[in-house]
């Protein structure tokens, strides 16, 4: 019976292999899962856009355990997927190993630099985007006190914090910034209860605008802002729609664009390895203005932020990058 | 397990009943797959093919099975002493810490033939130490071992978070993990080992710890059924009062059984840390400690049964991952559901089918005997 089952299964697998022979892109999501409303979901949206525009299917996998990361990349490579895109810095070790085994395949990784001739490393200038929302926070604040809630305490999140602080002080040199990190482990990316607690604590200290760079934890911060009638700023995806009226804006990180570009470039044959920096100039980061928050942003605020944006792009304003020296000095 | 003497032959007890349980689980899983619009037969074919259809599939299946053998043995040894060790997860976690600490401390000093056995011993010793504390509390303070071992899982998790965030993490590194060990502290992959004798198999996480797991099976078999201490453990588990009357000290048995149980669970660290990850990281046990309970239940607490049950669960993990690759509508949550159903039917409901199978069997035997007498 076993043999029969195996034979049937093999026949099935052959059919599948034939169907998957063309080079379709593949994406490996991080542990947060593809519907996290933030980082991974942005990648999912990028792939959906690619699918809608080109009509090509794509492969995807959500990792469940750490051992599966390497398995996922190898499996995608063996199936002939190209390019293979890893979402998040946690994928670096597994992707490095598999990329070395398959030197002919194209790989891409978000938020991390992997120095191999067949890997495209896509990093974002989060400090520049955070600078702009920091300015908006400072200008919208009545108390002159603005807050920051980070997810897991890692250099990447400190980069958000540092940029935000610089922006807040650029708009109002007397602004006070209160910052809290949710935790020190990956669990901090998905702890909305703690997010609410931290936000309420900051509101009690007089803060009236909070920027949450904390993945799923952010939803707790946004809820607290709505309940207290204060402002919150979203992150990664445009989250203005979550609570119109109290969502001041969102610091968008265009993971969707990065993923889409990488897949598209591989299809067109224009794919290049190396580090791609998605900064303000390349529209890789920015702030969201839509129907949900246009009543909160005055023309004066918009003009000032647009001017600062132009100055950052031209190099007139230098935003310090925390990860350059692991310190927030400016 | 039920102490009721079985009227069933061993092939039904060990072979047929588990198969019926797994089939029932697959039927329920199939119904769920059918309702979400996937073809259950296709799904099961992919699952089986993914787990056993290639050298690659076998590699992953056996890699997962290795960890389950360790935790299954751990649960079974404690169970023979009448103890329910729910702490396999934490003991495995701390066992991995032991292996990792030794590896990080000496991987630039000692050569592999010295360091790897040392790290294997450290994994067992750390796991045992983590199990001895609840064992002591049970033996001398009467704190229930189920409660304390569960609490020790949380303590292990908290300790590992502290160590990885504040002690072992490289400065500026974003992932919560230690540096990667040098070659001296790695257990060779099975593909490498086969390469030494000129056989080529595909590269998978499967490593030489499988050999260690199988050796542990033999050692457990000898220890439990052929040694004096093993006899004391079984006697205490079956009839504690009779054991005391026979001069066995139950407190000593509790400590020894739990220490061995913890050492076996800790050996998961050999597979995961020395064999696969080559660095310390968070949550590498990934539920193997809890799966070990189901494995031991299914394997009827016998090493041979545990190997078979581990193979089944290894196949479910590996085949489950293949399912998620092949059929987009089957998400990782759905895979967990299927695995959960199998654990439910073969672990928690292990004896649900026994009464009717027993009745059926006895009726068949009686009918046969009657037929034989009327004709003969």
Image (cartoon, rainbow, N blue to C red):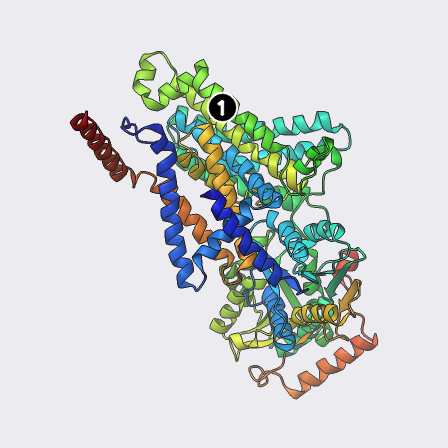
User: With respect to residue A117, does A54 lie above or below?
Assistant: below
Q: Position of residue B349 (x, y in %)?
A: 33, 42
In the picture as drawn, the residue positioned furthest to the top comes out as B247
In which quadrant will I find the C terminus of chain A?
bottom right
Residue B356 appears in the picture as rendered: yes
Which of B172/A98 is in front? Answer: A98
Q: Tag 1's secondary structure? A: helix
Query: Splitting the image into 4 quarters, where does residue A20 fall?
Result: bottom right
In the picture as drawn, the residue positioned furthest to the right comes out as A315
Q: Position of residue B366 (x, y in %)?
A: 20, 30
Local crowd size for mark 1, using a 10 Å CA cut-off: few (<14), some (14–19), many (≥20): many
Query: Splitting the image into 4 quarters, where does residue B284 fall?
Result: top right
Q: Position of residue B131 (x, y in %)?
A: 49, 30
Tell which subunit mark 1 falls on.
Answer: B
In which quadrant will I find the N terminus of chain A?
top left
Residue B69 relative to residue A163: left or right: left
Q: Please report the residue visible at 51 percent of the width from the left and 34 percent of the height from the top.
A: B69
User: With respect to residue A14, does B92 lie above or below?
Assistant: above
Residue A291 relative to residue A101: left or right: left
**Residue pointed to by mark 1:** B220
Q: Please report the residue visible at 47 percent of the width from the left and 43 percent of the height from the top.
A: A2
Q: Please report the residue visible at 55 percent of the width from the left and 44 percent of the height from the top.
A: B52
Query: Splitting the image into 4 quarters, where does residue A79 fall?
Result: bottom right
In the picture as drawn, the residue positioned furthest to the left comes out as B374
Which of B73/B93 is in front? Answer: B73
In the picture as drawn, the residue positioned furthest to the front comes out as B375
């Amino acid at each position: 019976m076993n043999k029969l089952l195996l034979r049937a299964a093999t026949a099935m697998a052959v059919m599948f292999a034939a169907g998957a022979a063309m080079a379709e892109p593949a994406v490996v999501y991080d542990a947060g899962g593809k519907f996290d409303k933030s980082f991974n979901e942005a990648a999912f949206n990028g792939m959906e856009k690619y699918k809608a525009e080109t009509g090509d299917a794509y492969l995807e996998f959500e990792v469940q355990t750490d051992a599966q990361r390497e398995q996922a990349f190898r499996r995608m490579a063996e199936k002939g997927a190209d390019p293979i895109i890893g979402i998040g810095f946690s994928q670096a070790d597994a992707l490095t190993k598999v990329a070395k085994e398959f030197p002919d395949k194209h790989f891409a990784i978000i938020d991390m630099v992997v120095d191999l001739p067949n890997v495209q490393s896509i990093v974002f200038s989060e400090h520049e985007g955070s600078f702009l929302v920091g300015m908006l926070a400072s200008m919208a604040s009545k108390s002159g006190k603005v807050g920051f809630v980070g997810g897991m305490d890692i250099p990447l999140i400190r980069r958000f914090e540092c940029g935000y602080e610089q922006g807040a002080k650029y708009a109002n040199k007397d602004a006070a910034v209160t910052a809290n990190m949710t935790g020190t482990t990956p669990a901090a990316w998905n702890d909305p209860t703690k997010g609410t607690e931290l936000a309420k604590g900051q509101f009690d200290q007089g803060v009236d605008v909070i920027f949450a760079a904390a993945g799923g934890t952010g939803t707790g911060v946004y809820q607290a802002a709505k309940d207290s009638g204060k402002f919150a700023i979203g992150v990664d995806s445009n989250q203005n729609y979550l609570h119109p009226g109290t969502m001041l804006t969102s610091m968008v990180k265009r993971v969707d664009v990065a993923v889409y570009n990488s897949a598209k470039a591989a299809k067109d044959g224009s794919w290049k390895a190396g580090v791609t920096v998605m900064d303000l100039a390349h529209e890789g980061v920015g702030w969201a203005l839509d129907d949900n928050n246009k009543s909160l942003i005055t023309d004066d605020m918009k003009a000032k932020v647009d001017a600062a944006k132009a100055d950052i792009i031209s190099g007139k304003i230098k935003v310090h990058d925390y990860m350059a020296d692991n310190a927030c000095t400016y | 397990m039920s102490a009721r003497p079985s009227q069933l032959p061993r092939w039904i007890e060990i072979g047929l009943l588990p198969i019926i349980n797994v089939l029932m689980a697959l039927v329920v899983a199939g119904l769920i797959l059918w309702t979400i619009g996937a073809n259950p037969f296709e799904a099961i074919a992919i699952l089986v093919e993914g787990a056993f259809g290639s050298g690659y599939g076998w590699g992953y299946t056996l890699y997962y099975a290795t960890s389950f053998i360790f935790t299954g043995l751990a649960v079974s040894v404690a169970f023979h002493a009448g103890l329910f060790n729910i702490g396999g997860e934490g003991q495995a976690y701390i066992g991995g810490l032991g292996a990792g600490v030794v590896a990080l401390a000496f991987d630039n000093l000692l050569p592999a033939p010295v360091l790897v056995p040392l790290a294997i011993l450290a994994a067992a010793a750390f796991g045992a130490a983590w199990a001895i504390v609840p064992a002591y509390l049970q033996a001398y303070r009467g704190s229930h071992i189920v409660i304390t071992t569960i609490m020790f899982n949380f303590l292990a998790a908290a300790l590992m978070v502290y160590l990885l965030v504040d002690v072992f993490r490289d400065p500026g590194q974003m992932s919560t993990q230690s540096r990667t060990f040098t070659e001296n502290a790695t257990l060779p992959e099975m593909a490498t080992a086969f390469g030494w004798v000129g056989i080529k198999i595909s590269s998978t996480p499967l490593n030489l710890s499988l050999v260690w797991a199988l050796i542990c099976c033999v050692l457990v078999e000898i220890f439990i059924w052929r040694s004096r201490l093993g006899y004391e453990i079984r006697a205490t588990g079956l009839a504690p009062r009779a054991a005391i009357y026979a001069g066995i000290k139950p407190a000593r048995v509790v400590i020894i059984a739990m220490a061995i149980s913890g050492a076996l669970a800790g050996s998961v660290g050999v597979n995961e840390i020395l064999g696969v990850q080559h660095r310390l990281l968070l949550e590498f046990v990934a539920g193997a400690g809890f799966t070990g309970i189901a494995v031991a239940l299914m394997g009827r607490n016998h090493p041979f049964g545990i190997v078979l049950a581990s193979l089944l669960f290894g196949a479910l993990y590996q085949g489950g991952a293949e399912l998620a690759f092949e059929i987009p509508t089957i998400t990782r949550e759905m895979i967990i559901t299927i695995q959960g159903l199998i654990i439910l039917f073969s672990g928690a409901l292990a004896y649900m089918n026994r009464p009717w199978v027993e009745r059926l069997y006895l009726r068949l035997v009686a009918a046969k005997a009657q037929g034989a007498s009327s004709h003969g």
